[in-house]
Image (cartoon, rainbow, N blue to C red):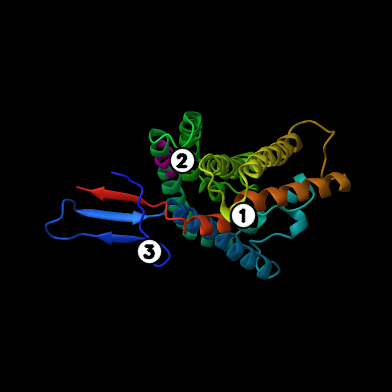
Amino acid sequence: MMEKSTEKNFLTKDIESTSKPGSNYLFSITFHVESLRLFAHSSFLFILVVAAVLTETLQDKLDSIPDPTETTIYNIFGFNHTCNWIDHNPAKLVAGILLPAFQLPYFLYIYFYHKRVQKSVENNEVPKWLLQYSSVITPFNLLAVSQIHIWLVHPPHDTYGFIAHYIPYFSIQTTFALQLILNVYYLTSKNNLPWGIPASHGKFYVYWLILLTLLSQGGVIVILSPATFFDTKNNMTQQIIFRAVSYLYSFCVWVLPIPISATLRKDGDLMNISLF
């Protein structure tokens, strides 16, 4: 059972649960769906920070961490991705332990956001095509989140090589982008973008995000292909451009959702789940 709540105490109590004798339900919880994304993205960022500190600090002290210029990623791209922080022990072990703190809330966020869109379509608050879009991307996004741990299982220097390592990383980045597009279009349709941003700017951001996704993800595919016109390892100009696009893309899909969710969770658009 899911419904929109108009409670006014969301600033002080975002989540509350009740189980009262004599009530019509066994358990009920009221929450804001953006709280799930806020926790998930914050956890993901925390995992990367912890991995970065471990890898950079222990770089010269442990044999399990190779020289930065001798990694598989460096030999392919001419520089090390964020992946390098998490590819080697002890960072990989710590990341594996912490990863469920991202997986579980983001998995729930994807599912409940789909239900939110479904309910809004029933109430004629957003266009029907948005539910169709959500119905297409939700299965892929749920699968990508559930399999992100394969990122750690297959390091780039292992038997299956870089591609097996990169696929789950590629998938989760794509999931972030697809989910963010759904999020922005939903908010645009309801005229509820944060910080008073006009709907037209929201649509422009979606186009910008699509472009960044194509450039960043497509660039990796070209580098891994037999094509020679794009070579970040041997062409410094191409490397600078590609790194700038990659860092900007990572900021847009990883970091920016954190302040967006922190702001949106205060708008009172709550959800309720009851077990009878």
Please give the range of residues in magenta. 113-118
Q: Is residue 72 visible in this depiction of the protein? A: no
Mark 3 or mark 1, whichever is nearer to me: 3
Q: Residues within 10 Å of mark 3 (few under 14, many from 20)?
A: few
Three-letter amino acid code at the position of disc 3: Asn
Q: Nearer the viewer, residue 65 or 259?
A: 259
Q: Which residue is mark 1?
A: 256
**Residue 179, quarter of picture:** top right
Picture coordinates of residue 231 (x, y %)? Answer: 83, 40
| Residue kind at label 1, given as amino acid type | Leu
Residue density around tag 2, few if under 14, some if 14–19, many if 20 or more, within 10 Å: some
Callout 3: SS: loop
As for residue 177 lying within the magenta part, the answer is no
**Residue designated by label 3:** 9
Chief secondary structure of the magenta span?
helix
Q: Quadrant of the N terminus?
A: top left
142 sits to left or right of 235: left
- Find residue 142 and name its label: 2
Q: Earlier in the sequence, mark 3 or mark 1?
A: 3
Q: Position of residue 246 (x, y in %)?
A: 72, 48
At horizontal 52% and vertical 55% (from top left) the residue drawn is 261
Give the left or right position of residue 1, taking residue 181 as reference. left
- Residue shown at 50% from the left, 57% from the top: 38
Specify few, some or many for label 1: CA neighbours under 10 Å numbering under 14, 14-19, or 20 or more.
few
- Residue type beneath disc 2: Leu
Q: In terms of secondary structure, where does tag 1 sit? A: loop
- Among the 4 quarters of the image, the one containing residue 125: top left
Closer to viewer: mark 2 or mark 1: 1
Labels 3 & 2 near each other (Cβ < 8 A)? no
Residue 48 x/y as whole percent: 60, 60
The image's mark for residue 182 is: none
The answer for how far apart the CA atoms under marks 2 and 1 are is: 21 Å
